[in-house]
Amino acid sequence: MNLPTEVRYRPYADWTAEERATIAKNVASSPWHTTYHLEPKTGLLNDPNGFSFFNGKFQLFYQNWPFGAAHGLKQWVHTESEDLVHFNETGVVLLPDHAHDSHGAYSGSAYEIDDKLFLFYTGNVRDENWVRDPLQIGAWMDKEGQIEKFENVLIQQPSDVTEHFRDPQIFDYKGQFYAIVGAQSLEKSGFIKLYKAVDNNVQNWELVGDLDFGGTGSEYMIECPNLVFVDGKPVLLYSPQGLDKSELAYDNIYPNTYKVFDHFDTEAPALTGNGTLENLDYGFEAYATQGFNAPDGRALIVSWIGLPDVDYPTDRYDYQGAMSLVKELSIKDGKLYQTPVAAMETLRQTTETLTSKSATNNIYELEFTVPANTTADLMLFADEAGNGLRLTVDTENGKVILDRSACGKQYATDFGTSRDCDIETAETSIRLFADKSVVEIFVNGGEKVFTSRVFPTENQTGLVVPKGITGTYYELG
Ligand code: FRU
């Protein structure tokens, strides 16, 4: 939603209790609230931040402007989870309340160090002429949720980057802390800078160099770069804005991509070996995905179900955005797979044979198989007139297609109303999660993933399953 700058950057303290209550009431009146996907209490949720493990629990913050569905003065909102399925807001927030983050506590990462959680993030600072100074800054969060910001700037804007320099991700590689930061060159192409903590002290960072990851040159900014290790292989997840479609086909306003490499050369510095550019997600919205290696080694990722510069049907209810399920990464036969964490099964309330249903509560999981040489058309969020969200699994021509043109409130139609991906022409398995206004579809065990919003009308609650499809329906709760 377009709101004037004065509104979006109005100091938090100036918002009255009455205004806050009006916003909260409006949010509560939306028909589209998710049930097991994290949403903002109020306002806009964008990137996942500080995804980490600390104090015996998983930590996940989200970028938020709390006063409406717009990108304004951002804060981080803290949640924690024991099972990676239920995330509870704790009330802790990283506020834009310091000279070094005066115009927003922008995205970043976190890592447990000596009984405290180190938060590494971008301070968005603007001067009176609205000229931006992007600062990479830090804070400690203790076990009580007290936040203490560092007084020193950890990384200043280098002379070879524009104002687009943000989203530091800290990671440990062979006992040494490194950080990668998304950047834009003076020639306006996106790249990544690699830093290392001197003597492993996170108060002191030095530049290693520009990380060679085989960028195409067409992307004008790399947002939210993340390096995780899956079975020893470095996997780079990133959001390359402006990527030329001749490099990789995509339909969303901005893509979220990945590359699986063989080696991380910390001296060059470079990611080498393999490195084919791939879409992380084939749905209508998944962006700014953040990942980290948990203490047990698992590479866990979570995505913003939303996109920058897109208006949503929920905007009139003063909120926007949701967080995806947490997915675990694995590599099989050189391919990256994304699988919802095992604890998702604890949400299953009923187990039934999959058949058509005239009405559901739109909160369910499906598991089914489509035989080879078949075109199966399922209709989710279906109404009696036969409209709904159409999922086509065509194992004869090797395609999965998601078409939302006949489901509920339409938006972002300039970017098309269907999404698809190629699959093998063979029996295909689907695991699908529906949650009121979110669908997440995992094809062939997570080899391809579709993450999307959908905003059905009140009567779009049916499920149409064609003959010949066998599977299971679980009501979730
Ligand atoms: C990505 C992003 C980040 C930035 C944050 C600000 O969606 O633009 O690059 O840090 O959002 O909210």
Image: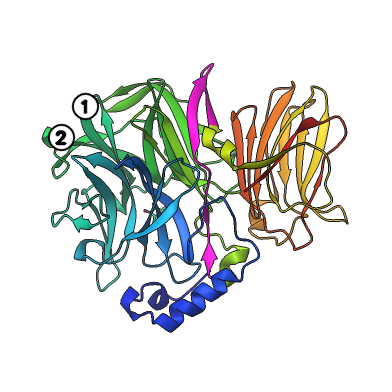
Q: Residues within 10 Å of mark 1 (few under 14, many from 20)?
A: few
Residue at the image point whose x is 20% and y is 29% from the top: 176
Q: Position of residue 431 (x, y in %)?
A: 66, 34
Q: Quadrant of residue 454?
A: bottom right
Q: Which mark is residue 175?
A: 1
Q: Which mark is residue 79?
A: none
Q: What is the magenta range?
A: 318-338
Q: Position of residue 207 (x, y in %)?
A: 19, 38
Is residue 260 rendered to the left or right of residue 342? left
Q: Position of residue 268 (x, y in %)?
A: 25, 25
Q: Main secondary structure of the magenta part?
A: strand
Residue at the image point whose x is 21% and y is 49% from the top: 159
Q: Amino acid at mark 2?
A: Asn
Tell whether circle 2 marks a residue whose Cβ is less than 8 angstroms from ligand 1.
no
Q: Is residue 336 magenta?
A: yes
Mark 2–mark 1 distance (CA, rounded to whole Å): 8 Å
Question: Which residue is at the front of the view, 317 or 216?
Answer: 317
**In the displayed structure, would residue 231 be above or below residue 17?**
above
Q: Helix, strand, or loop for circle 2?
A: helix
Q: Are marks 2 and 1 in contact (CB under 8 Å)?
A: yes
Q: Is residue 67 visible?
A: yes
Is residue 139 rendered to the left or right of residue 226? left
Question: Which residue is at the front of the view, 372 or 405?
Answer: 372
Q: Helix, strand, or loop for circle 1?
A: loop
Residue at the image point whose x is 84% and y is 43% from the top: 356
Q: Which mark is residue 200?
A: 2
> Which quadrant contains ligand 1?
bottom left
